[in-house]
Amino acid sequence: MPAISDIILQALSTSTDGLLILNREKKVLFVNEVFADFFGLTPAGILKEQQNILSYIPINGGPELNRVFNLRYGDLPERQLCISYSEAGFGEDGNTLVHLVPLQIPDYAEWKQDVSRHLFENIQDPVMYVDAEGKIQQVNNSFTRILGYTRGGVLKAEDLYVDGEDFSRRLIALDVEDRLPDIETRLQRADEKILSFQETIWVHRNPGKQVLGYTSHLRDLSRYEYLKARLSVSQQNYNRLFEIITSSIIIVDELGIIININSSAEVLFGHNRADIIGQQYDDIFRLGSSGPSIKDLAQLTREHGGRYIDIGVPRKRNDGSHIYTYVTYFQLELEQEGGEVMFIMEKDLTDRINLEKQLEQSIVQVKEAQEATIIGFAKLTEYRDHCTGEHLKRIQEYTEALARELQRDSKYSLYISPEYIRDLSLSSVLHDIGKVGIEDSILLKTGALSKEEFDRMKRHARMGGDALLAIDNELGHESFFTIGRRVAYYHHEKWDGNGYPEELSGEEIPLSARIVALCDVYDALTSERPYKKAFPHDESVSIINKQKGKHFDPEIVNAFLRIQGKFKQIRQVNSPQT
């Protein structure tokens, strides 16, 4: 079995806490990658800038302090962290272990669209891509940092290898192998210093099986040994660190038998280690039979390169209660005995997940209240007009159906998202909200309007848009009212530029207003008014089709024609009972 020092070094390096070890002179002895990442640096960068870095965190509070503070560093977003201390007792007395824990799990949404590029640029090991002629075409940030070259400073891979035959043997092997794992090699830095690496190579081939090049992943062996030397601690000190680390740690063998747990695990799960060491992990911690077993988790960890993270995992405590945890699984190979052990590190997320569920329910309730309020607000306008209450429901359903068809098959497909459809459908009922400012003598007139009266009627578009703009300004950010404002302002504009209030044309008119415009006209055509009879569905469709490229966007008319039967159905279901 590996020495406990190797296991704890692995725990320090892969902990979900940010960890820093200081000696009595406040010099950094060790820093892990999570801690460094809070500052957008590497561990080596922290060591180099340690005096500056330490000025950003409250390190003079004394042991066992738990304090929340806001970290502001450089151009990075502000992070809220909790800091605590433990007396580590490494080497000389007086050394301190500093924990930095984020109060919220980082949101990685900003790079989800380019995961490969993110991993390439942020992995802590050097990576290079070499073409079939041996020329280096691309390297990552760690390559330039650790080996000291600029991105354009190395032209030929063979110049890196201390042993010239090392590179030649690789080229020969590439013709027959697709992967060359765990090759120990020595490379020369830009300053001619020699570093030792463990290299893994993946070969790239074209469809004809010809070698196009290879990707080389370099694990810095000298850095690993350097960290061990910097810590310089005894077996007893590593055992002490195992006990004081705030994450729960459970170690199991390849059969799923519990080998050891630390004090944090005892507290988190309510078990005494003496009672569960030697028992099956699944029997103690697995909740029900639906979740993955420890053997399944071991396989998942292998498939993810020896490290696997899961969030919100349900766990069983000794008292029968359930909790949710943030788990990191990683495997360590046993060098002498063979086989492997599974290292399971967990943080309790129960309170956070329960709060998220409550927040989610609150958001649903707020949205329902918003929608009901908006419908009620819009109906105040409809009560002053000739329309019935079903008009609003029809407009919403027409709008949603037409937007979904445009999302399915039109040039606007990429623009129209599910959130856009929801917000547009909700805000479509506000299209005539400005009519609350129109006099009854005009709004309720049964005959034709004079030119002066029609000019006054046209003002409702601008008044409605201005009212919703005022709401947006009060909120200080865009919302579904933003779409509602565009609809209110521009749903009477026409594709050929002959509409109002601004005589916009073509795609100058917001898409939301173009969609609602067609829906509003269809509903007006098929509805009876004191001054007109309702047109039949087929005749209304014909009128709209003739206005393609004049009143309406041709693309939207085409979508309408494809689903005009859906409009007819909505009309029939949501008509006033006679």
Image: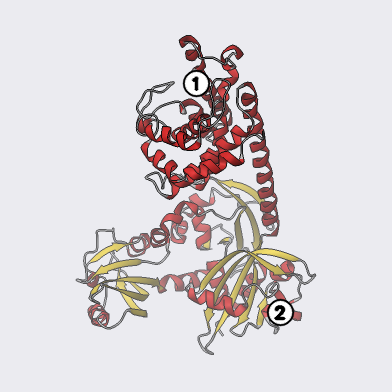
Work out how far the residue at label 1 is from the one at label 2, CA to CA, in angstroms.
68 Å
Percent x, y for residue 135?
22, 67
Q: Can you name the residue that lies furthest to the left here?
A: 133
Residue named by callout 2:
283
Crowding at dot 2, Cα within 10 Å, few <14 / some 14-19 / many 20+, comes out as: some
Q: Please give the name of the residue rendered at 56% of the width and 22% of the height, measured from the top-left corner.
A: 434
Q: Is residue 163 above or below residue 45?
A: below
Q: Is residue 413 above or below residue 429?
A: below
Q: Please give the name of the residue rendered at 42% of the width and 62% of the height, measured from the top-left corner.
A: 119
Image quarter in which the C terminus is found: top right
Residue named by callout 1:
462
Crowding at dot 1, Cα within 10 Å, few <14 / some 14-19 / many 20+, comes out as: some
Q: Secondary structure at mark 2?
A: helix
Q: Earlier in the sequence, mark 1 or mark 2?
A: 2
Left or right: 188 in relation to 110? left
Q: Is residue 5 visible?
A: no
Q: Is residue 351 visible?
A: yes
Q: Is residue 157 above or below residue 392?
A: below
- Nearest-to-viewer mark from 1 and 2: 1
The residue type indicated by label 1 comes to Arg
The residue type indicated by label 2 comes to Asp
Q: How many tags in the picture?
A: 2
Percent x, y for residue 544?
42, 33
